[in-house]
Image (cartoon, rainbow, N blue to C red):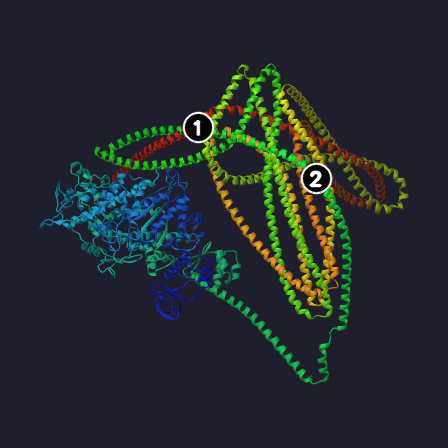
Amino acid sequence: LLPSIEMKRADQAKVYDTKKSVWIPDPKDGGYREGLLESGDLEDPASKCLVVVGHEKFTHKAAEVGKVNPPKFEKCEDMVNLTFLNDASVFWNLKTRYQAKLIHTYSGLFVVVVNPYKRYPLYTHRVCKIYLGKRRNECPPHLWAIAEGAYRNMLMNTKNNAMLITGESGAGKTENTKKVITYLAMVATGSGKKVEKKVSLEDQIVATNPILESYGNAKTARNDNSSRFGKFIRIHFTQSGKLAGCDIVSYLLEKSRITEQQSVERSYHIFYQLLQPYGDGICPGGLRAKCFVSNDIYDYIYVSQGKTSVSSIDDNEELEYTEDAFNVLGFEEWEKFDCYVLTAGVMTCGGIQYIQKGRDEQAELSECGPDTFVGKAAGAFGVDAAAMVKAFCKPRIKVGTEWVTKGQNIEQATGATGGIARAIFDRVFKWLIEKCNDTLIDASLKKANFCAVLDIAGFEIFEYNGFEQISINFVNEKLQQFFNHHMFVVEQEEYVKEGIDWVMVDFGMDLAAAIIMFEKPMGIWAILEEESLFPKATDKSFEEKLKASLGKLPVFLKPASKTDKNAHFGVSHYAGVVNYNVTSWLEKNKDPVNETVVELFKSTSKSQLLVHLWRDHPGQPTTAPKDDGKKKKKGGGGKTVSSVYLVSLGELMTTLYSCEPHFVRCLVPNNHKKPGDVEPPLIMHQLTCNGVLEGIRICMRGFPNRMPYPDFKMRYACLGQAEIASSSDNKVAAYALMDKIEFDRERYRLGHTLVFFRAGALAGLEEARDGLVIKWIRFIQGEIFKRVRTRVYEKKRDQRELIKVAQRNFRKFLGMRDWGWFIIIQKTRGLIGLPNPEEELRLLEEKANATFGKYQEALDVTKSLEGQMGNLKDDIAAMTKQLSEEQGNISVYTDRQAKAIAAKGEAEVELAQQQKVLTSEEASRVELAAEVKAHSGSISAVKKDIEDVELAILKVEQEKGNRDHTIKTLQNEVAEQDEVINKLNKEKKHLSSTQAKSSEDLAAAEEKVAHLMSVKSQLESTLDQLEGGLDKEKKSRATLEKAKRKVEGDLKMAQDSVADLERTKREIEVVIAAKEKNNGLLSAKLDDEQSLVAKAQKNIKELQGRVEASEEELEAERQARAQAERQRSDLAREIDQLGGRLDEAGGATVAQVELNKKRESEIVKLRKDVEEANISSESVLSNMKRKQGDAVLEMTEQIDALQKMKAKIDKDKTIIMAEIADARAATEEVVRAQASQDKSNKALLDQLNATNKKVDASNLTLGDYAMSKNKIANENAELFRIVGDLDNNLNIIAKSKSALGAQLNDVKALCDNEARERQLLLGKFRNLEHEVDGAKEALDEEAAGRDNILRLVAKAEADAAALRQKYEIEAVAKGEELEMTKMKLTARNTEAEATVDNLNAKLVQVEKAKGKIQGEINEMTASLDQALVINAAMERKAKSFDKTISEMKGKVDRLSFDLDVSQKNTRNASSELFKVKSAYEESILQLEEVRRENKTLSNEIKDIMDQITEGGRSIHEIDKIRKRLEAEKLELQSALEEAEATLEQEENKVLRCQMELTQVKTETERRIAEKDEEFAMVRKNQAKALDSMQAALETEAKGKAEALRMKKKLEADAADLGLALEHAIAGNAETQNTIKKYQLQVRDAQAKVDEESAAKSVAADAKVTADRKAAAMQNALEESRALLETSDRQRRSLEQELADSNETLADLGNVNQSIAAAKRKLESEFNQLGGDLDEMTNEARLSEDKAARSMVDAARLADELRCEQDVAMNLEKDKKLLEAQCKDAGARADEAEVNALKGGRKAMIKMETRIRELESELDAENRRNGDICKNLRKSERTIKELTFASDEDKKNHERMQALIDQLQGKVKSYKKQIEEAEEIAALNLAKYRKVAGALGDASAEADANEQAAAMRKARARSASLV
């Protein structure tokens, strides 16, 4: 849309000379080229101008030369703004913009659009938003800017708008019309029927395009798809701007193309489409057979005179589009096929060949059979062939009152045949447009205004110009006149608006001469009309009459055509002179039709469409009434083409003059359709024909260039700054500027807001401005050049001065070189400032002695450290001995723990097995019930659908009957009985087609049924899998059968005992209530044990994850080790380098050699240290591995123990559940009638046996699916593990969410506390105000007392005179300080009293709450006593339960005893472990001290080595080696420390695992509750089970795919890690080899150094042994640490078991727990009170701050008071003395208050201590209360759950008895019913679609008939108007 920055820069860089740059014609390509004017005057048209282009010179006339516009106007958006509006500038602007992909350019009111021959993104929704609601000058040039202006103008002015789009064939007129319609459709959405159709206006018009293009488009020389007719599309809008529809009006269809074409052209596309193979499938037998045509186009002369095929058009595909368009627009079948057949008949008429009859000139046909062309044409027209031949050869004419026949020769008959063919095609085309308009107009909407688009051919100048060309050119002449008139009306209105003196000119009169010549009474059209009416007139007579009448007019010229030598005259149009040839103008204008043939069509044709087309033609009526009635209307059939043309043109111009016009001109850039290529002659020709140059010519007569005042000032203020600033009036300032530069006022005008310039005037201003700019640029360039050359000059000047100095010095040297003193000075100059070598040697010796003293000190420190090391060894030995003793004690505890764990594991395993059995049975029952409900729901839904379909079919049949009735009545009104029969036959065919469609729909439905069957099979497979799972679980049921038999035996025993219990029914009910409570406790215990089992399993998984994490960390350690080895290899390379340097330094002194020996011995020691460190690190690593293995073994042992405990608990659970079942059965038997107990028990047993048998049978049936389930189970195992991990993550997220919720609650509580504090502070503030009032009253009293004191103190005035000055200076300040302290103390006292009151009130509240809680506790104890009484009664009366309970109590007692013993042992072990740990920590501290001392020694050694490096480079290199080795040692130590840290992390992880285990326990409890809720939801939502199963299946499939993907990814990662591990191992091996290699090298060097360092080897060996001992001790410490860690783990496991046993004891001793819960609750409330106390203290602080602020205010008031006192002192000295005495009295009062405040502080301290005591008591009570509430809620919840579960179990048992019997049969019956229902549904759907199709066809036919009736009415009205 806009040129880029690079384009603008390139344009500005263009070479341009304001006076010499000109354009001249280029004869090579017909364009223009730019050159420089050397000589000549451009103002004189007759002068010769010499122009230089490159190295060539050309001479042209001044009229042929045009000036070039400045670079500012390159790619100008509006060509009217160009300074020089010559043809070359216009062409250059269009060319450059087109080649820059800017295809839109303004030219005044025009927008010029160049065909890009390429798709640019210029017509998208994004571009639409750019132009939406914008003015034309606010956006770049675009077609949509014109459309937006038209639309906004229509809305604002409520006036119709029109867009005139003209151009040559191929310029893109139709495409631009589509784009305009697209934009209007986007900016204005319609309503009404448009919404119902849901098709946009653009889509509707696109639906009409295939039809209009097929019948109205043809191939021309320039365009393969040229529109050969003009169209005026009016888009209607409502008052609010909404779209309301559109209509199309056609102009000037080129009828001559129907019967004749040039060699490079082709006729209309529809003729060639009819012969395509696609037509074979349109109708039975094929379209060609129906249209009576062959498949060879050359059989038809009318359409084969030129090209018969077009490469860019696929006629077969276009026929498909045409057929679809007919169907979309609602054409009826007979209308469509009649249209096709008539078109084929027009084409067939060309094959009719007449022969001469004998010697007469009578024409006739040899034969007229059905296979001849005339027979096919007659068959197409629906008439008799012989009658039609007779009508053509011997038409009837009326002579007087009689009809006679007239003979026709061959030429006349052939012409009449062609005329009929052209007339039929023309009428078919107009009928198609009427039908299209019917679909595009919405009669329900009120149309206010319209935006119209006129798409018409532009001005044409061809080689041969005939009747069609003069018609089109006259239209363009009228349009150009309309444009000229409108353009300068707009221009001149703007001149008047701006206040410019201007005489109005009507430029529309410029074209009046040519238009008058055409339209005057004896003009061209009148003469043509007159000659057409004379039978004897010929083309020659018409030519002579034209020349005789118009020959003297200036616009009527003699022929001067180079292309047409036979042209007869020329006309001077606005676009140029056109030479016309009048051959066959009269015939084309008459376009006669044989009225006999027309009458034959009207009376005998079987084609309804043909009769409809000729309905308005009078024909040749045979009866007298018809003669009288049709006589006047015969002229309607005899209208000439020119008369119809002039009427339609007049209507068009009238419409355009009533509209607001907008102009679009389309250009063809080249004839070969290449993007970016231009042909200058073609473009200039189009610019001339389109009127663009004419519009520019008109602009040049006015003021084409204009500029707003701000832009004018900004650009041209440089020409006169003072003049522009001289006045605020724009006109005055502009006149002053123009007068200064002597710019002629005739060349410009000043408006109110714009400055107007004549053409070329703006170039003068630009020239003046460019002169100034160039001048300033030259000034700047001169200044820059000056500065550059000044620098060069200064450099040269300095060089010259230096040369002089050098010359002067050289001359002096030549003079003094033989002087003796000069020679001595020169030779001694080098010795000045040299150092003294003896002094330097002395300094080095002192330095060496100092460093050796430090080294001696280091040796002393080493000895002391060795002594400390011995003490450490003793301590370590004692610690190891103590540790071994402790381990012996721990072994006893571990044995006991192992036994307890084994018992616990057995119970857990048994519990897990029973739980699995229970869950599997329950799940299978729920699934079967869900399936039954789902199938029943689906069957009911299918039945409902079938009923709905049947009702719909009945409704459709009723509607069909009504429609058929209306159709029959309409058919009776429109046609006769035979036409009704034909229509019924067509309907039968259509029904067959609809039947085919319905069969296709049936096939689609069958495919859908197949898809549903596949889904059903998938669901059945999932059902089979679930049944397989049930079968697997049934295998474990065999064990339950034994338990069931035992239960049955117990049941019989219970039945025997029922007889004894009948007499004590009421007591048993009480006992049952107590037992149910006990059962609740037992179930709670069972839940706890289940949660423990789940937690243990989860803990196992997490421990496995931890082991994997530890393995990963071990791998990370290995990688770090590999990295360390790489660093070691780097250091080894440095050693090699240092060795080379050592060889170079071999020639050092003996002292250096001795020092080297010493250092080498140290290096040997350090190397040994490194090796020992490596050994120790490897031992540590092995210890770590061993510890990890021990930890894994311990975890596995714990897991086994937990599983055993679980099995044991499961066993106990089964016993308890059996007892519970017995109790429930007994209660049910007691409640029921006693007589029916035995029968009911037997019935239940029979039912149970039956169910068992049925379950066994189902097990046998489900056994076949076990294998498939096992396969899927193996795959799902990994998925379940992943799901478990995801659940863990979800739990963590849920925990974090709960934590955040808790934080939110805390924040809310804080907010509430803040609100309470605010209220308290407000109360305190009011109290303070009250106290201030009291203080004021006290102040008043003090003032009264002061008056009394003044009277008493008057006597002592003389005594105080000596001390007056002292009191004046000091007493005032002291009094102020005392006042401030007094105010502060009073404020604090009041605040403390308030806080004490608040605390007392809160304490009262706490006491009340405590009393309330105590009452609740009493109630709980009472209920507890009652429960105990009930429990005692139950124990006395339920002996069978007492035994089991006593056994359980014994077990619990034994467990509690074992637990107490283990707790005691654990406490002892923990105390001993604490001692060991403290000793271990002390040893670690000592070790760290030793390490720090070693580090200090190593640092000192480093310093010594650094100092010794000054003695020689070799020593320095050895020092580097030592540092490197020390660094390695430090790295190893750090690695060791990291290993210790990792071990600590592992311990922390184990602790976290234990914490997570407790969390998992709570989570499993929550999950159990959630599962119960889910069970209830499943029971309620059984009807939705099938959908949920399908969704679950899909999610499981997705999860399976995701798991497989993750599995593959993990396998790939494992493979990568394995490869990385192999590489790391290989790298480690390589590094080890390199280390060994370097060690060998170092040892060789060491052997050389050992020969010279024998003196210190003994000390080094001693140090090495000490280090080895230290390493051994460190290893011992590591081992002890590992033992400590194992003991810690054991201790933690014991603590965990202790916690579990504590929980068990807590469950059994629920009374103590309830009391503890009450205590915790009281403690929590006490904590809350403590929080309130903290809030009070905060409030006290805030009040203190406020008091401080009030004290500051008091200080400020005191300052003011002091100022007033100073004033009073100056006035009355006596009064000051009295005030000082008063302040002394106040000071004494303050001291008294201070004393009182001290007593208050003591009281505050007492209160605080009392508050702390109360807080501690409240915390204890809160804790107890919390525990009580928790246990209470838990017991209530368990009671409710058990009661609910018992009720649900009863209901489920009753349901299962009824459902299990019917399950297998129902599943099969459901499958059969589903299949039958699907078949019935498919059949009903097919019937419904068939009926719906028939109904749609009937409704379409009814609509078509209604449209036809409306069209008949409209045409009747139009005929009556005519």
Residue neighbourhood size for the residue with mark 2, other residues' Cα within 10 Å, grouped as few (<14), some (14–19), many (≥20):
some
At x 56% / y 53%, what residue is drawn? 1622
Residue 675 in the image: x percent, y percent? 37, 57
Nearer to the camera, 125 or 1583: 1583
Residue 1173 is situated, as x and y percent measured from the top left of the image, at 68, 54
What percent of the width, then of the height, locates residue 1415? Answer: 69, 24
In-image side of 90 versus 825 (left or right): left
- Mark 1: which amino acid? Gln
Instruction: Check disc 1: other Cα within 10 Å, few if <14, some if 14-19, many if 20+.
Output: some
Query: Which residue reaches farthest left?
Result: 359
Task: Return the residue nearer the eye: 858 or 362.
Answer: 858
Secondary element under disc 1, as helix, strand or loop, is: helix
Residue ID at (56%, 72%): 789
- The image's mark for residue 1495 is none
Distance of mark 2 from mark 1, alpha carbons?
A: 62 Å
Q: At label 2, which amino acid type do we have?
A: Ile
Q: Is residue 1120 left or right of residue 365?
A: right
Give the residue at mark 2. 890
Q: Would you say the residues marked 2 and 1 are in contact, meaning their CB atoms lie under 8 Å apart?
A: no
1597 or 259, nearer to the observer: 1597
The mark found on residue 1864 in the picture is: 1
Question: Closer to the camera, 193 or 1865?
Answer: 1865
Element at label 2? helix
User: Where is residue 1461, by image quadrant?
Assistant: top right
